[in-house]
Image (cartoon, grey):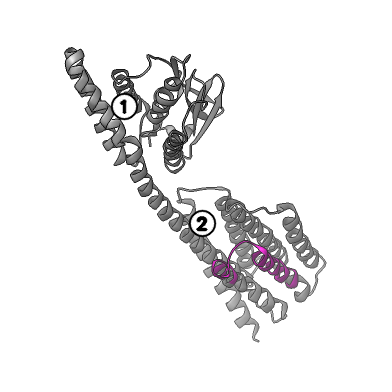
């Protein structure tokens, strides 16, 4: 094949590939979600862009030292394989699979070393490109043994065929170097797959939020509680008429806040959540129950949390903590910052689950699961509950940056 034609193919494909990689990198950097998987992807794209830049600089159209630029381009191309392997391993880890990252990274890197040695010691095209082929064959093997189904792996497999084909063309010795184009097509396809996975995950979360709203509505405004509240307010009309107005206001405020929270998919100020919690506490004091006190210690108040997270925990503490205990009479609500996280703890001095009936345990479980779901979806938060002879302690843990107003 004519040398000029070969050079034209090489420079054209390299320029197009560099443009594609730059566009992918710009779009990827604007994503809201920058996890470790996307971090490895961005590093891989940057290395690929660097390799393409050296290939372009080393072409005969650029009046530069061809050898040194060519060496650098091959070295960087050989590094794309190990980096993409790390991206794939991180993808599997995010899906709960167990992978020995060290083994696969060493395997990929050993192929990269063979490429570098072949380039340094002026090896043949076959010696340079075949280790690159081996790198992506290894990725294919990883796909086969992964937990992914054939359907889920199809996109990856098609993408990997591009660098394998490009490396085989290079190994033929005709002088065409389209490895950069093959890698650019792989990265472009992988990025589309990543976007597709993200959108599918977002849709799943939206469905979960919708289902959670229904469950939360049944949990927060269950008929039994409404019946008891109205019955007690009716009794107050005879026993304590002066307290009826306050009881009705507390009850209506409780219902209003619950209904408003169910339509709120954003974070709310902690103070607003505490206003709702205080409304429930006032209502609980009206209903027939054991007398109790609430102590508050807020080291931090100016932050945001999902609605209906603190109030259900206080409700459980009143109903099933001190309410089921002969000795319990205090509830402690605290907030503090530690290790980059904001903590909200609700603790009672009852005796935990000792006298709770199975139906009541189910009721508590639904409520706490709702809280966990809202924390996870809206702010990547956690809920941990510890029960002992001294009482129950529920602790909400949220990354501090997630509690700040956007």
Callout 1 environment at 10 Å: few (<14), some (14 to 19), or many (20+)? many
Residue 139 lies within the magenta run: yes
Q: Whole-percent x and y of residue 284? A: 32, 21
Q: Main secondary structure of the magenta part?
A: helix
Residue in front for this viewpoint, 394 or 7: 394
- Name the mark on residue 285: none
Residue 227 appears in the picture as rendered? yes
Foreground pick, 207 / 351: 351
Q: Residues within 10 Å of mark 2 (few under 14, many from 20)?
A: many
Q: Position of residue 306 (x, y in %)?
A: 39, 35
**Farthest-out residue, right:** 121
Q: Image point 66% across, 73% down: which residue? A: 164
Residue to which mark 1 is pinned: 276
Horizontal side of residue 67 vs 32, given as left or right: right
Please identify the residue farthest to the bottom as the structure is shown: 1
Which span of residues is magenta-colored?
A: 130-157
The residue located at (78%, 72%) in the rendering is 127
Element type where label 1 sits in the image: helix
* Residue occupying the point 45% across, 38% down: 362
- Under circle 2, the secondary element is helix
253 inside magenta stretch: no
The residue identified by callout 2 is 25
List x then y, in percent, for residue 121: 82, 67
- The quadrant of the rendering that contains the N terminus is bottom right
Q: Residue at x 42, y 21 (%)?
A: 323
Look at the image and tell me in which quarter the C terminus lies.
top left
Q: Left or right: 219 with respect to 355?
A: left
271 versus 105 height, above or below: above
Which quadrant of the view contains residue 303? top left
């Amino acid at each position: 094949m004519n040398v000029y034609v070969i050079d034209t193919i090489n420079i054209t494909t390299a320029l197009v590939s560099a443009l594609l990689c730059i566009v992918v990198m710009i779009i990827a950097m604007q994503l809201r979600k920058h996890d470790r998987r996307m971090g490895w992807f961005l590093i891989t794209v940057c290395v690929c862009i660097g390799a393409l830049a050296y290939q372009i600089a080393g072409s005969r159209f650029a009046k530069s030292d061809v050898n040194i630029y060519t060496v650098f381009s091959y070295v960087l191309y050989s590094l794309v394989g190990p980096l993409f392997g790390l991206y794939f391993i991180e993808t599997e880890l995010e899906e709960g699979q167990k992978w020995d990252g060290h083994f696969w990274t060493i395997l990929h890197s050993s192929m990269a070393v063979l490429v570098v040695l072949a380039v340094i010691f002026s090896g043949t095209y076959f010696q340079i490109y075949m280790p690159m082929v081996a790198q992506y064959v290894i990725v294919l093997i990883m796909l086969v043994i992964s937990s992914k189904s054939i359907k889920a792996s199809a996109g990856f497999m098609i993408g990997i065929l591009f660098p394998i084909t490009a490396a085989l063309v290079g190994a033929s010795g005709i002088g065409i170097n389209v490895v950069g184009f093959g890698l650019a097509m792989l990265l472009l396809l992988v990025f589309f797959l990543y976007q597709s996975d993200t959108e599918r995950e977002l849709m799943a979360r939206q469905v979960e939020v919708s289902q959670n709203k229904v469950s939360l509505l049944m949990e927060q405004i269950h008929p039994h509680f409404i019946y008891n509240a109205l019955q007690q307010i009716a009794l107050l009309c005879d026993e304590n008429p002066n307290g009826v107005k306050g009881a009705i206001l507390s009850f209506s405020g409780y219902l209003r806040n619950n209904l408003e929270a169910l339509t709120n998919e954003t974070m709310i100020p902690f103070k607003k959540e505490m206003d709702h919690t205080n409304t429930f506490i006032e209502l609980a004091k009206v209903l027939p129950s054991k007398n109790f006190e609430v102590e508050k210690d807020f080291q931090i108040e100016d932050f945001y949390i999902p609605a209906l997270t603190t109030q259900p925990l206080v409700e459980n503490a009143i109903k099933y903590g001190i309410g089921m205990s002969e000795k319990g009479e205090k509830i402690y609500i605290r907030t503090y910052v530690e290790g980059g996280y904001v903590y909200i703890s609700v603790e009672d001095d009852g005796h935990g689950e000792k006298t709770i009936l199975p139906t009541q345990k189910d009721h508590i479980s639904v409520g706490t699961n709702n809280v966990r779901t809202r924390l996870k979806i809206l702010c990547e938060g956690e809920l941990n509950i510890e029960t002992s002879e001294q009482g129950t302690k529920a602790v909400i843990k949220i990354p501090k940056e997630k509690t700040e107003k956007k």
